[in-house]
Protein backbone atom coordinates (compact mmCIF):
# COMPACT_ATOMS: atom_id res chain seq x y z
CA UNK A 1 0.00 0.00 0.00
CA UNK A 2 1.30 3.43 -0.91
CA UNK A 3 1.47 5.99 1.79
CA UNK A 4 0.34 9.42 0.75
CA UNK A 5 2.67 12.08 1.97
CA UNK A 6 1.08 15.29 3.01
CA UNK A 7 1.51 18.32 0.79
CA UNK A 8 3.39 19.92 3.67
CA UNK A 9 6.50 17.93 2.73
CA UNK A 10 6.42 19.53 -0.73
CA UNK A 11 5.51 22.99 0.45
CA UNK A 12 8.15 23.25 3.19
CA UNK A 13 11.15 23.59 0.82
CA UNK A 14 9.31 26.24 -1.18
CA UNK A 15 8.44 28.21 1.95
CA UNK A 16 12.07 28.01 3.15
CA UNK A 17 13.35 29.15 -0.25
CA UNK A 18 10.94 32.09 -0.33
CA UNK A 19 11.94 33.08 3.20
CA UNK A 20 15.64 32.97 2.28
CA UNK A 21 15.06 35.14 -0.76
CA UNK A 22 12.96 37.60 1.21
CA UNK A 23 15.76 38.04 3.76
CA UNK A 24 18.08 39.35 1.01
CA UNK A 25 15.51 41.69 -0.53
CA UNK A 26 15.56 45.28 0.72
CA UNK A 27 12.46 46.75 2.31
CA UNK A 28 10.28 48.71 -0.13
CA UNK A 29 11.58 52.04 1.23
CA UNK A 30 15.21 50.91 0.89
CA UNK A 31 14.51 49.64 -2.62
CA UNK A 32 12.99 52.98 -3.63
CA UNK A 33 16.00 54.82 -2.14
CA UNK A 34 18.41 52.53 -4.04
CA UNK A 35 16.61 53.15 -7.33
CA UNK A 36 16.67 56.90 -6.67
CA UNK A 37 20.42 56.71 -5.94
CA UNK A 38 20.91 54.76 -9.19
CA UNK A 39 18.97 57.41 -11.12
CA UNK A 40 21.12 60.13 -9.53
CA UNK A 41 24.31 58.25 -10.49
CA UNK A 42 23.06 57.91 -14.07
CA UNK A 43 22.15 61.61 -14.17
CA UNK A 44 25.64 62.46 -12.88
CA UNK A 45 27.11 60.42 -15.73
CA UNK A 46 24.92 62.17 -18.31
CA UNK A 47 25.95 65.60 -16.98
CA UNK A 48 29.65 64.64 -17.12
CA UNK A 49 29.31 63.34 -20.70
CA UNK A 50 27.39 66.45 -21.80
CA UNK A 51 30.17 68.58 -20.28
CA UNK A 52 32.85 66.43 -21.99
CA UNK A 53 34.33 65.89 -18.53
CA UNK A 54 36.61 62.84 -18.85
CA UNK A 55 37.46 62.64 -15.13
CA UNK A 56 33.83 63.03 -14.08
CA UNK A 57 32.77 60.38 -16.57
CA UNK A 58 35.47 57.87 -15.62
CA UNK A 59 34.78 58.33 -11.90
CA UNK A 60 31.47 56.53 -12.39
CA UNK A 61 33.05 53.34 -13.78
CA UNK A 62 34.24 50.44 -11.62
CA UNK A 63 37.94 49.59 -11.88
CA UNK A 64 37.05 46.35 -13.70
CA UNK A 65 34.37 47.89 -15.94
CA UNK A 66 33.84 47.02 -19.60
CA UNK A 67 32.69 49.48 -22.28
CA UNK A 68 31.37 48.10 -25.57
CA UNK A 69 31.49 51.06 -27.96
CA UNK A 70 30.02 51.17 -31.43
CA UNK A 71 32.15 49.53 -34.16
CA UNK A 72 35.22 49.24 -31.93
CA UNK A 73 36.82 46.57 -29.75
CA UNK A 74 35.74 46.19 -26.14
CA UNK A 75 37.45 48.62 -23.76
CA UNK A 76 38.32 46.77 -20.54
CA UNK A 77 39.29 48.65 -17.39
CA UNK A 78 39.28 52.34 -16.55
CA UNK A 79 42.37 53.23 -18.62
CA UNK A 80 40.91 51.79 -21.82
CA UNK A 81 37.52 53.35 -21.07
CA UNK A 82 39.23 56.71 -20.48
CA UNK A 83 40.87 56.45 -23.93
CA UNK A 84 37.50 55.75 -25.55
CA UNK A 85 35.83 58.75 -23.87
CA UNK A 86 38.81 60.99 -24.70
CA UNK A 87 38.39 59.91 -28.32
CA UNK A 88 34.66 60.75 -28.31
CA UNK A 89 35.11 64.07 -26.53
CA UNK A 90 37.87 64.96 -29.00
CA UNK A 91 35.61 64.69 -32.06
CA UNK A 92 35.08 68.25 -33.36
CA UNK A 93 31.62 69.53 -32.54
CA UNK A 94 30.86 66.57 -30.24
CA UNK A 95 27.84 67.17 -28.05
CA UNK A 96 25.67 64.54 -26.40
CA UNK A 97 22.30 64.53 -24.69
CA UNK A 98 20.74 61.45 -23.12
CA UNK A 99 17.36 60.51 -21.75
CA UNK A 100 17.00 57.84 -19.09
CA UNK A 101 14.00 55.63 -19.89
CA UNK A 102 14.34 52.86 -17.30
CA UNK A 103 16.15 52.13 -14.04
CA UNK A 104 15.80 49.03 -11.88
CA UNK A 105 17.76 47.10 -9.27
CA UNK A 106 18.26 43.45 -8.37
CA UNK A 107 16.30 41.91 -5.51
CA UNK A 108 19.27 42.19 -3.15
CA UNK A 109 19.93 45.82 -4.16
CA UNK A 110 23.55 45.27 -5.26
CA UNK A 111 23.08 45.43 -9.04
CA UNK A 112 21.25 47.96 -11.18
CA UNK A 113 20.41 48.46 -14.83
CA UNK A 114 19.72 51.74 -16.59
CA UNK A 115 18.80 52.25 -20.20
CA UNK A 116 17.87 55.11 -22.41
CA UNK A 117 18.34 56.98 -25.64
CA UNK A 118 20.90 59.53 -26.78
CA UNK A 119 21.49 62.07 -29.49
CA UNK A 120 25.05 63.06 -30.36
CA UNK A 121 26.09 65.77 -32.76
CA UNK A 122 29.52 66.24 -34.34
CA UNK A 123 31.18 67.73 -37.38
CA UNK A 124 31.32 65.79 -40.66
CA UNK A 125 34.52 65.82 -42.75
CA UNK A 126 33.02 68.70 -44.80
CA UNK A 127 32.31 70.70 -41.63
CA UNK A 128 28.55 70.13 -41.62
CA UNK A 129 26.89 69.09 -38.38
CA UNK A 130 25.78 65.45 -38.30
CA UNK A 131 23.48 63.75 -35.82
CA UNK A 132 23.74 60.25 -34.36
CA UNK A 133 20.76 58.84 -32.48
CA UNK A 134 20.94 55.65 -30.49
CA UNK A 135 20.33 53.76 -27.28
CA UNK A 136 22.37 52.43 -24.37
CA UNK A 137 22.28 50.01 -21.46
CA UNK A 138 24.46 50.28 -18.37
CA UNK A 139 24.87 47.64 -15.67
CA UNK A 140 25.81 49.10 -12.28
CA UNK A 141 27.15 47.51 -9.07
CA UNK A 142 26.71 48.85 -5.53
CA UNK A 143 28.90 47.74 -2.66
CA UNK A 144 27.26 47.60 0.80
CA UNK A 145 25.35 50.86 0.54
CA UNK A 146 28.22 52.63 -1.21
CA UNK A 147 28.12 54.49 -4.51
CA UNK A 148 26.89 52.94 -7.74
CA UNK A 149 29.60 52.19 -10.33
CA UNK A 150 29.16 51.04 -13.94
CA UNK A 151 30.46 47.53 -14.59
CA UNK A 152 29.22 47.04 -18.18
CA UNK A 153 28.24 49.81 -20.61
CA UNK A 154 27.10 49.39 -24.21
CA UNK A 155 25.59 51.71 -26.78
CA UNK A 156 24.65 51.55 -30.45
CA UNK A 157 23.03 53.68 -33.10
CA UNK A 158 19.53 53.51 -34.51
CA UNK A 159 21.00 53.77 -38.02
CA UNK A 160 24.43 53.71 -39.61
CA UNK A 161 26.71 56.06 -37.68
CA UNK A 162 27.53 59.30 -39.50
CA UNK A 163 31.00 60.07 -40.82
CA UNK A 164 32.72 62.62 -38.64
CA UNK A 165 36.00 64.45 -38.45
CA UNK A 166 38.84 62.60 -36.74
CA UNK A 167 39.08 62.98 -33.00
CA UNK A 168 41.69 65.42 -31.76
CA UNK A 169 42.59 62.77 -29.15
CA UNK A 170 44.44 60.79 -31.84
CA UNK A 171 46.60 63.81 -32.69
CA UNK A 172 47.91 63.78 -29.11
CA UNK A 173 48.77 60.05 -29.28
CA UNK A 174 51.36 60.37 -32.08
Image: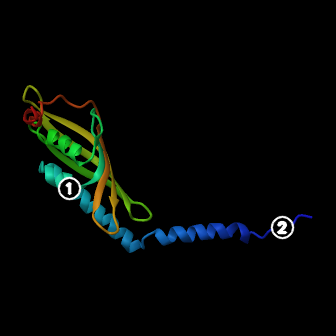
Q: Which numbered mark, 1 or 2, is in the foreground of this view?
A: 1
Give coordinates of residue 11: x percent, y percent. 68, 68
Q: Secondary structure at mark 1?
A: loop
Q: Is residue 117 left or right of residue 127?
A: right
Question: Residue 75, which numbered label?
Answer: none
> Looking at the figure, which quarter contains the C terminus?
top left
Residue extending furthest top?
A: 126
The residue labelled by disc 1 is 59
The residue labelled by disc 2 is 4
Give the quarter of the image for residue 162: top left
Mark 2 crowdedness (10 Å alpha carbons): few <14, some 14-19, many ≥20: few
In the displayed structure, 24 sits above or below 132; it is: below
Give coordinates of residue 99: x percent, y percent. 25, 51
Q: Alpha carbon of mark 1 to alpha carbon of mark 2: how far?
A: 61 Å
Give coordinates of residue 145: x percent, y percent. 32, 69
In the displayed structure, 113 sits above or below 107; it is: above
Q: Nearer the viewer, residue 48 or 159?
A: 48
Q: Is residue 5 left or right of residue 109?
A: right
Amino acid sequence: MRVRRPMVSLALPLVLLAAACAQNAPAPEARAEAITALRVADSTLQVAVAARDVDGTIALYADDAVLMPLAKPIAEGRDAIREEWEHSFGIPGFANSSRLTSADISLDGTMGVTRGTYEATMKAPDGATVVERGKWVSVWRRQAGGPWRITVDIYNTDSLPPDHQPSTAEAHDH
